[in-house]
Amino acid sequence: MNRTTPPRPLDVEALFPELAAHRGTTTRLHPRPGRPGVSESSVGGPMLWPADEPWPVCTEVHGRGRGRRPADIRRKREVMAAAEARDPRRGLTEEELRLVEELEREHRVPGASENDPLPLIGLAQLYARDVPDLPAGPDGADLLQVFWCPFDAHRPTGYSMLLHLRWRRAAEVVDVLTSPPQPEVVGYEGYVPDPCALHPEQVVTYPFAGLLPEDLCERIDAWEEALEEEAEEREDEADPVAYQYDLSIPPGWRAGGYASWHKTDPYPMDCPTCATPMRLLLTVDTSEWDGGSGSWTPLEDQGLRPHPAAVPTGVVVGNHGELNVFTCPTDPGHPPRWSVQ
């Protein structure tokens, strides 16, 4: 089923004509539970990976011999989803509670050292044919594959995530790896994605307010303050329309467009190789919508309970935030950078 973003609550360019010069597009990926194949764009689905090519691994020194088993994490999600579908008010049965307790138990990997090659988890693959706003890959590549390490233990802080991007030309893959290696245990269940098919939709987007010209940003702030004062006078319990939450950057997984900087102040994202300002490649979001961004809920999903409808992938970024991955426009083969918001 396609997903359709509702029209915005108002025409923001009619209020602020200068925004027309900053108008862009982004492709909302709309991941939803499914059974995608290797020839399809997906989150958590099988990768179009050559059988004779080594699977990407993490070689940084960090603990990797204790954690939860991916199969247990997925089984727990199945139990929780079944209970939610049965009756969201009653919760788990006594038997299910005991099962969940067992599934949440950590396990040790005998003999694991801190620098054993650790298979990365395939997070997403995007075919250029499906995603209009996916930036061009290097050397005519038409497929982007994204991997991450399932432990928060990397440089520079010792608590950072590790990402790996692989661009390739899909037509060159003949023999596909059918049983890729998997980590025996993971350090965080939010790193384990559930298989989801994508329903890409291109929508209009505008920059984060703090990156607009100062005078325009000030006018938007003043307009929002006036709306808030009017709502207070009317004792209106509904939140007024806001540029950040309703008019500029949609929530959820998406490709291209503008990054949100709602957790930190904006800071330069320059290529570590050539110092060129980078552009947004991909946003990985914990939730497809929430209380503040409900106006972006697709028409086909309206009326559904936010949980589990708004969290289809099982991925959790940081403190239930989002991951913005940036790429070099001069050479997409240069190393990426990322920011957690």
Image (cartoon, grey):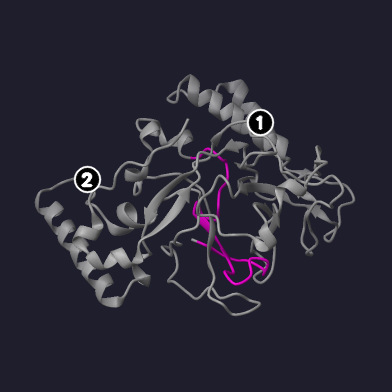
In terms of depth relative to the viewer, which is nearer, 161 or 16?
A: 16
Residue 109 located within the stretch drawn in magenta: no
334 part of magenta stretch = yes
Q: Are marks 1 and 2 in contact (CB under 8 Å)?
A: no
- Badge 1 marks a residue whose secondary structure is helix
Give the residue at the far left of this rendering.
233
Residue 313: image x %, image y %? 56, 40
Does residue 111 lie above or below 281 as drawn?
A: above
Label 2: which residue? 238
Which residue has dot 1 on it? 75
In the rendered view, would you say 94 is above or below 60? above
Horizontally, is 200 left or right of 235 in the view?
right
Residue at the spot 15% in from the left edge and 61% down from the top edge? 226
In the image, what residue type sits under mark 1?
A: Arg
Q: Which residues are magenta?
A: 311-340
Determine which quarter of the picture holds residue 327: bottom right
What amino acid type is highlighted by mark number 2? Ala
Residue at 86 percent across and 52 percent down: it is: 112
Classified by dominant secondary structure, the portion drawn in magenta counts as loop
Residue at x 65% of width, y 49% of height: 188
Question: Picture coordinates of residue 159 (x, y %)?
Answer: 64, 64
Q: Residues within 10 Å of mark 2 (few under 14, many from 20)?
A: few
Please determine whether, in this image, residue 115 is positioned above or below residue 309. below
Question: Does residue 186 show up?
Answer: no
> How many residues crowd mark 1 within 10 Å: few (<14), some (14–19), many (20+)?
some
